[in-house]
Image (cartoon, coloured by chain):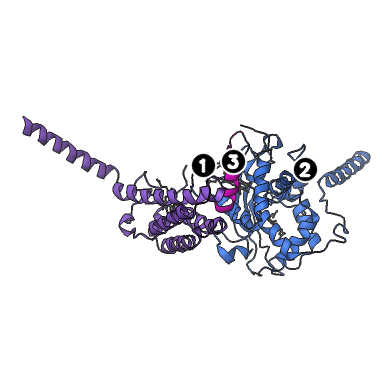
Chain colours: A purple, B blue
Amino acid sequence: MKTFLLTITAATILITGVATAQDAPFAREIKVRQGIMGYRTMNVAILGAMAKGEVDYNAEQAQKAADNLLTAASIDMSMLWPEGSDDFANPDTRALAKIWEGGSDVGAKAQALVDAATAMQAAAGIDLASLQGALKGVGDACTACHEAYRASAN
Amino acid sequence: MRRILLSLTILAATGAAGAWFVLRPEPLPADALAGLEADAVRGEQVFWAGGCAACHSAEKAEGADRLVLKGGRRFPSPFGTFVAPNISNDPAAGIGTWTALGLANAMLRGVSPEGRHYYPVFPYASYARATLQDVVDLRAFLATLPADPSPSAPHEVAFPYNIRLGLGLWKRLHLDDGWVVAGDLNQAETRGRYLVEALGHCGECHTPRGGLGAMDRNRWLAGAPIPGGKSRFPNLTPAKLTWSEADIVAFLTTGFTPDYDSVGGAMAEVVDGLSHLAPSDRAAIAAYLKRVVPAE
């Protein structure tokens, strides 16, 4: 009986596993890359709150967030963007097929964020004004890629 | 019979003259700009506040290309599709030979140098509130930008909307250079009102429109459907926009919303323009938005 139940459970897991994979192709890659985007956002939020004056400027915290942002911007994400993992194939993603089409400059847009995050890393620990000055560059880099390669939210 | 015909002719003639009187373009007096000195450096601020690049640069232009005002962007509307003309410094294809008065007539009165009406998709219903000094400065700045020989494309607008004289009537009904938000405003709010209601033409997107496409002053900035799109221009009145002034300033500076998502759609270019302004100007816009009448 025990073995029987176990088999059923295993089969169920197998079946659901297969079903999910079929219903939602690239579900795993999509989830992970969205998580990395979320982690970028978390660190931008720490810098942004200081820039706005919602939180007192703290050089150490700012530096840490900027370091993390640069790391998250520099990470090799090639495994997470398989061709075809677009919003047409899976409704859970907002990635546009244009990412993989000829003439795509998604690589340059990713590099632009690395450059902006590098500038932020150099600025964040100096003082509040330097942090504020570097934030627009980061914002521009996120916006430029989202406008080109991310479907709008609604 | 002769007499009847004669009176009919007279009637028709006075009718046409009357119609012409109502529909005629009304340019500024020839000496309107007398005594104003141009400052191209200030003109650059007017340029970015006015968002000219967002319509007159090529679609998706980035960086230095945003200063090449070659035209070509398309604006779908219930009346047809309008195409932005070349306003680069080219003497033939663009506005290289235009005077400051010519630009003032276009922006404040919606009238071309040949005396034709412009369509209000060119947001002169907002620019009508701009100061002549700002237009003179802007003219000087535009003269520093590159020339581009691309010819302007015709609008794709069908009868009767292709009859420009009819726009004279629209202007009589809807061209109103009075301020929308009235009452006691402090210095920052007053500057913000100028930036939002005049140069920034924020109402052109964020205010709902009536039947003939005029902004509804009674629902100022209350949000509107995006023509040709599925979503809406958000409501910016305090009824819906509950962001703090610091949040609004941060958004207009970096493009980050309070939850650090990035600005999208047509607003991305507006933010790009506003980010060139002095920080005090973005703070002024935020202060003004808090004074707008709340509307659901």
Q: Position of residue B19 (x, y in %)?
A: 83, 44
Q: Position of residue B31 (x, y in %)?
A: 88, 59
Q: Position of residue B183 (x, y in %)?
A: 77, 36
Callout 1: residue from which chain? B
Q: Amino acid at mark 1?
A: Lys
| Residue A57 lies in the magenta-colored region | no
Residue at the extreme top: A1
In the image, residue B285 sits, relative to residue B84, either above or below, namely: above
Callout 3: residue from which chain? B
Q: Secondary structure at mark 1?
A: loop
Horizontal side, residue B36 vs residue A72: left or right: right
Callout 2: residue from which chain? B
Of the pair A22 and B222, the residue shown nearer to us: B222
Pointer 3 or 2: first along the chain: 2
- Specify whether residue A86 is in view: no
- Range of magenta residues: B239-256
Q: Secondary structure at mark 3?
A: loop
Residue B176 got which mark?
A: 2
Categorize mark 1 by other alpha carbons within 10 Å: few (<14), some (14-19), many (20+): few
Give the residue at x 68% y 34%: B293
Q: Quadrant of the N terminus of chain A?
A: top left
Same chain for the residues under marks 3 and 2 in the image: yes
Q: Amino acid at mark 3?
A: Ser
Give the residue at x 58% y 52%: B253
Q: Quadrant of residue B92?
A: bottom right
Of the pair A122 and B17, the residue shown nearer to us: A122
